[in-house]
Image (cartoon, rainbow, N blue to C red):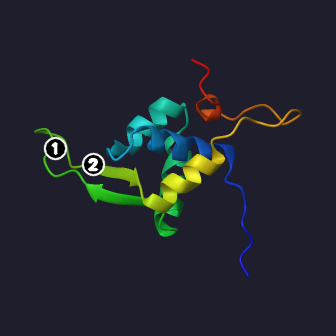
Amino acid sequence: MARARRPSPQTAAVLTTLAETGVGWSHGYDLCRALGLKAGTVYPILIRLFERGLVETSWETDPPRGRPARHLYRLTIAGAELARSVAVPARAGDSAPAPGAARLAPRTT
């Protein structure tokens, strides 16, 4: 029986950021910039989420001239459900938030 583990703060931030785009596609580079995380953190997370069926990928179909096509990412239905489940405020006494963790706090306005 597989043990259900809570995603890391970085994974939760990626999920939440992808959830904010709805059904739209996101580039990995844009995720890195939005979260303040390095590519060596974000891309392995995206690969694991894809392998678990939580993210779908596609290649950009019409890249601007002079630039190669980029990979695009968006949440599957299961990924959106997981993103909703991890988007809760941190418990009191937790360690310092990870980069991008501000995106996990509920909006007050």
Q: In which quarter of the image is the C terminus?
A: top right
Q: Nearer the viewer, residue 58 or 106?
A: 106
Q: Which residue lies furthest to the right in this view?
A: 93
Image height of 76 relative to 8, above or below: below
Q: Return the x and y of residue 54 as percentages of the image width and height.
A: 49, 61
Quarter of the image for residue 76 reads bottom left
Q: Residue furthest top?
A: 109
Image height of 27 relative to 53, above or below: above
Between disc 2 and disc 1, whose residue precedes?
1
Q: What residue type is labelled 2?
A: Arg
Q: Quadrant of the N terminus?
A: bottom right
Q: Is residue 57 left or right of residue 49?
A: left
Q: Looking at the image, do the residues carrying marks 2 and 1 touch, with CB atoms under 8 Å apart?
A: yes
Q: Mark 2 points at which residue?
A: 70
Q: Return the x and y of residue 97 as percentages of the image width and height.
A: 73, 32
Q: Return the x and y of residue 78 as percentages of the image width and height.
A: 50, 61
Q: Residue furthest front?
A: 109
Q: Is residue 84 left or right of residue 76?
A: right
Q: In this view, does 94 lie to the left or right of 6?
A: right
Q: Which of 45 and 106 is in front in this view?
A: 106
Q: Mark 1 points at which residue?
A: 63
Image height of 84 relative to 2, above or below: above
Q: Residue at x 38, y 51 (%)?
A: 74
Q: Residue at x 46, y 63 (%)?
A: 50
Q: Answer whether residue 98 is visible to the viewer in this image.
A: yes
- SS at circle 1: loop
